Amino acid sequence: MMPGDELKRTLLDQNVTILTNTAVEEIKDGTNTVINKDGSRSVLEADVLLISTGRRANLQALEVDLEKDGPYVRTNEAMQTSHPDIYAIGDLAGGWQLAHAASAEGTIAAEHASGRTPNINMQLIPRCIYTYPEVASVGFSEAELLKEGRAYKTSRTPLRINGKSLTAGNTKGFMKLFSDEKYGEILGAVLVGPHVTEMIAEPEAFMQLEGTLEEWKAMVHPHPTLSESLHDTAVSLLNKL
């Protein structure tokens, strides 16, 4: 099961209507929304309208002619633009449009400008979605591993067998890990459930330090906690290698 499937099922259980492949054509009276789904137009009446359509770089605000990369400013690994004395980070430079990613890019730019060698791995930026249940991931997704033809193993632990989840009556979600089939290197993690945006730092740390499943198995996790499910998933994955 993919994270989106788990989230969709939870939203449907809350009587939330989900419309996909639907275009917003017009907003009337502040909240009434004209939509078009498969060529059929209708009006959704609402008390409150939340607009969340993403962000884009405001290149027109630039007073310096910098080389572009599509809708963004082109940068190198040190966040330098085509003008070596000018750096670009965050939404202006593209990449992960996340506040903590922009902060990391700012650190890279500042260190490089100070003559230091940045050592932040931007490939390991955790991605968090603050829905209910929460969703968090880091590293490769399963789709990316399949696209690259990587030989990998995966293991998934549902939260319905976790002691704390059962006690709290909140068992929606799962922990899923991917590892290299030959060496057991941890390639990615996908977590769905309560507080997983806090827990994603654990698999990220292992990946940053090139930790192994053997080392993860040797860790002792407190009980009862949700993080136990991460440990169980790592042990299960190790047994598959």
Image (spheres, rainbow, N blue to C red):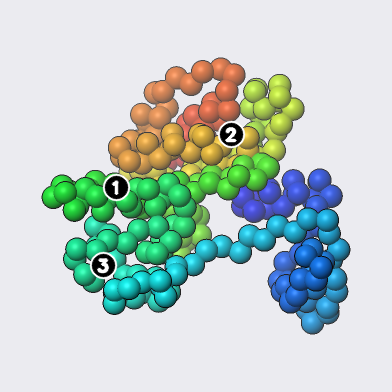
Residue 185: image location, x then y, percent: 35, 43
- Give the quarter of the image for residue 20: bottom right
Q: Which mark is residue 107?
A: 1
Q: Which mark is residue 218?
A: none
Left or right, 20 with respect to 140, comes to right
Q: Tell me whether circle 3 and circle 1 mark residues in contact (CB < 8 Å).
A: no
Q: Which mark is residue 195?
A: 2
Pointer 3 local density, CA inside 10 Å: few below 14, some 14–19, many at least 20: many
Disc 2, SS:
loop
Residue depicted at 39% across the width and 52% down the height: 102
Residue depicted at 44% across the width and 36% down the height: 201
Disc 3, SS:
loop
The residue type indicated by label 3 comes to Thr
Residue 41: image location, x then y, percent: 83, 78
Residue 230: image location, x then y, percent: 51, 32
The quarter in which the C terminus is drawn is top left
Q: From what the image shows, is residue 127 above or below residue 84?
A: above
Pointer 2 local density, CA inside 10 Å: few below 14, some 14–19, many at least 20: some
Tell me which numbered mark, 3 or 1, is placed earlier along the sequence: 3
Residue depicted at 42% across the width and 27% down the height: 217
* Residue 125 visible to the viewer: no
Distance CA(mark 3)–CA(mark 2): 37 Å
Residue marked by disc 3: 81
Pointer 1 local density, CA inside 10 Å: few below 14, some 14–19, many at least 20: some
Near-viewer residue (30 or 199) = 30
